[in-house]
Structure formats: structure tokens, C-alpha cells
């Protein structure tokens, strides 16, 4: 579980339950018969993530998450997952949910992408939301 790392870039916030989150993420990945080589979560600002979105994806809009899949072979997961804390806060307010619940949803969303889940079509979005909810229910902290 020491292969899941948490970093902050240009933001300050209290990040709670790190060990429990590592265990939860690892169990999600293991449940799909995959193994984590290394996952780096980088928590950042809207502007930081917007610049990455423009530079690497040619998207000129704010987003809550960008997942870079660095995996080199099959079932071994390696990734950098950038999450805008400002977007998470705004979405928590918008959807009337607790900040930590929204943060955990976004964190597991990135993992689900690495496991092959998509969110480009309406059907895919529905499946992604169901899977996120299923994963969130399995948190035990």
C-alpha cells in the first residue's frame, strides 16, 4: 500500500484518512485482478489543472480530474492522477454532498478509468456512477 502517494501542488487542505484510502483503493484494484505498481495523486488548484488540460488534452475548460495512465503492461497499474480541490469543493456544494465524499468519488473515478471504465456516452456515465457508488459503499472509515 506504500505505492499510493499523495502530493499537493499550490493548494492547502487537510487530507484525512490516508492509510484507509490506500487500503480502499488497493482493494478496489485487487478486486479487478489488477496490481498497483504506483499511483500518484496530485491535489491542485483549478488553474493548475486547467493548464494541464490545455497542454496535454487540448481542452480549454476546468475539470475536477485528469488521469494519466503510465502503465506499461497489462494488469499492473501506474498512473498520475491530478485532482482540482477547488472543483471538488464546488461540486460538493452543487451536488449537496460532503467534501470528503466528493473527493473520494473523484479519487475512485480515476481508478475506475484505469480499470477500463469509460464516461464518454450516456450509458457509460451511468455505469461509471453505479460503480463509483458501489465503491463508495465499501469504504469502512
Image: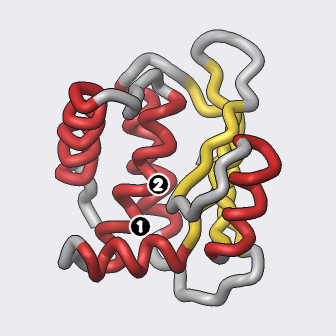
Q: Which numbered circle lies on residue 103?
A: 1
Taking 50 as reference, is 115 above or below it?
A: above
Q: Nearer the viewer, residue 137 or 103?
A: 103
Q: CA distance from mark 1 to mark 2?
A: 6 Å
Q: Is residue 3 left or right of residue 140?
A: right
Taking 125 as reference, is 42 above or below it?
A: below
Residue 3 in sight: no
Q: Which numbered circle lies on residue 66?
A: none
Q: Nearer the viewer, residue 44 or 4?
A: 44
How is the protein colored in the picture? secondary structure
Figure quadrant of the C terminus: bottom left
Q: Farthest residue toward the top?
A: 74
Answer yes or no: do the residues labelled 1 and 2 have beta carbons within 8 Å?
Answer: yes
The residue positioned 46% from the left and 54% from the top of the image is 107
Taking 24 as reference, is 123 above or below it?
A: above
How far from the left and from the top, in percent, is residue 57?
71, 41
The residue positioned 68% from the left and 63% from the top of the image is 49
Residue 47 in sight: yes
The part of the image, by quadrant, that contains residue 90 is bottom left
The residue positioned 66% from the left and 44% from the top of the image is 39
The part of the image, by quadrant, that contains residue 139 is bottom left
Q: Nearer the viewer, residue 120 or 117?
A: 120
The residue positioned 68% from the left and 32% from the top of the image is 69
Within 10 Å of disc 2 (Cα), the crowding (few <14, some 14-19, many 20+) is: many
Q: Is residue 90 left or right of residue 131?
A: right
Taking 52 as reference, is 76 above or below it?
A: above
How far from the left and from the top, in percent, is residue 88?
44, 72
Q: Secondary structure under badge 2?
A: helix
Number of numbered markers: 2
How far from the left and from the top, in percent, is residue 24?
39, 49
Q: Secondary structure under badge 1?
A: helix
Q: Which residue is mark 2?
A: 107
Amino acid at each position: 500500500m506504500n505505492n499510493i502517494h499523495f502530493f499537493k501542488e499550490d493548494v492547502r487542505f487537510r487530507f484525512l484518512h490516508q492509510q484507509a484510502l490506500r487500503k480502499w483503493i488497493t482493494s478496489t484494484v485487487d478486486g479487478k485482478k489488477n496490481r498497483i505498481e504506483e499511483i500518484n495523486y496530485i491535489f491542485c488548484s483549478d488553474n493548475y489543472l486547467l493548464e494541464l488540460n490545455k497542454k496535454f488534452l487540448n481542452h480549454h475548460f476546468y475539470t475536477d480530474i485528469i488521469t494519466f495512465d503510465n502503465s506499461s503492461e497489462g494488469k499492473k497499474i501506474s498512473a498520475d492522477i491530478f485532482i482540482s480541490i477547488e472543483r471538488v469543493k464546488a461540486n460538493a456544494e452543487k451536488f449537496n454532498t460532503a467534501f470528503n465524499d466528493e473527493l473520494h468519488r473523484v479519487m475512485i473515478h480515476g481508478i475506475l478509468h484505469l480499470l477500463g471504465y469509460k464516461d464518454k456516452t450516456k450509458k457509460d456515465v451511468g455505469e461509471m456512477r453505479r460503480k463509483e457508488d458501489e465503491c463508495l459503499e465499501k469504504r469502512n472509515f
